[in-house]
Amino acid sequence: MANKLVCVVGPTACGKTRMGVLLAQTLGGEVVSCDSMQLYRGMVVGTAAPTAEEMQGVPHHMIGVVDPREPYSVARYAEDAGRCVDDILARGRQPIVVGGTGLYLDALLAGHGFAPGQSGGKVREALEKRFDAEGGEALLAELRRIDPESAARVEGINRKRIIRALEVWYETGRTLTQHNLETQSVPPRYDAVFLGFAFENREDMKALIDRRVDEMAAQGLFDEVRALLDMGVPRDSTALQAIGYKECLACLDNAAAREEALAEIKLRSRQYAKRQLTWLRRNGDIHWYHWKRERDFQAALAFSTEILHEHGVF
């Protein structure tokens, strides 16, 4: 079926990478990563980006394609990943979108609706300076006058969201609320079948996340962070704010011991997995497969192919 995507979703460490490869091999497909940090070059260990061995010859896209020193946005991801998807479809192959960054996935599937504005733009830069000089409450009060609906959706003094809503107004003369209402009626760019993978017992997920962090440390996570600093990646860059990298920075700066850093990475990774599940469970179209303590990938593949057959994917 034209423009039908298979989307493999779930929290971190839930087996998405392996399921994506298995499905690509079964369907004659190619994987398009939907992970906001696997995009960056030189960030392999800390993002658990698939190795050549794990890819098993299946083409993977949107991994290691962005310099970690440059800003990147969800709108740019939708554009870049959309080109990959369209190329795969044009060649008669099946796109398998794999990843846990829900915002990026929603943007890719919608394929529209991005208001102007970008990191490093003049309007945003001016608003950031005003935020620092005048304080967040002053800018939030301004947003309440301009776009009360957007202001009501801001929890507390959220710097990023306040600046973004004001940026849209100053660049377009339209409020972010108006923009969102106008784009909601536009049909999505792609049709999708969602396959979700998560653990039946939350404790099993937590244990696997902890083991994965220990494996990352053994594979050279701290060395990877040093290498990024050596290549000139700014400490305040988006790339180095990722879970795992920020904590390693603190350790390298002697602000935390190695074991303390690893414990913090485990905690933040578990918290992130919980947020991912909360985001994904808003989508009632996801077909969930729940792992026991030991993951049975062949059983999961059988479940997945049955669902996909029912939806006309093959």
Image (spheres, grey):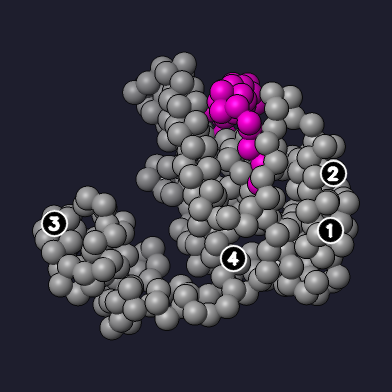
Which comes sooner in the sequence, label 4 or label 3? 4
Name the kind of residue labelled 2 in the image. Answer: Ala
Which comes sooner in the sequence, label 1 or label 2? 2
Front disc: 1 or 4 = 1
| Cα distance between the residues tagged 1 and 4 | 23 Å
In the structure shown, which secondary structural element does the residue marked by tag 1 occupy? helix
Name the kind of residue labelled 1 in the image. Answer: His
- List the residue tagged with mark 2: 302
Identify whether 12 is placed above or below 163: above
What's the residue at 55%, 55% (across, down)?
283
What's the residue at 45%, 34% (across, down)?
271
Which comes sooner in the sequence, label 4 or label 2? 4
Residue 108 - label = 4
Q: Residues within 10 Å of mark 2 (few under 14, many from 20)?
A: few
Give whichever of 103, 218 is nearer the camera.
Answer: 103
Identify whether 187 is placed above or below 106: below
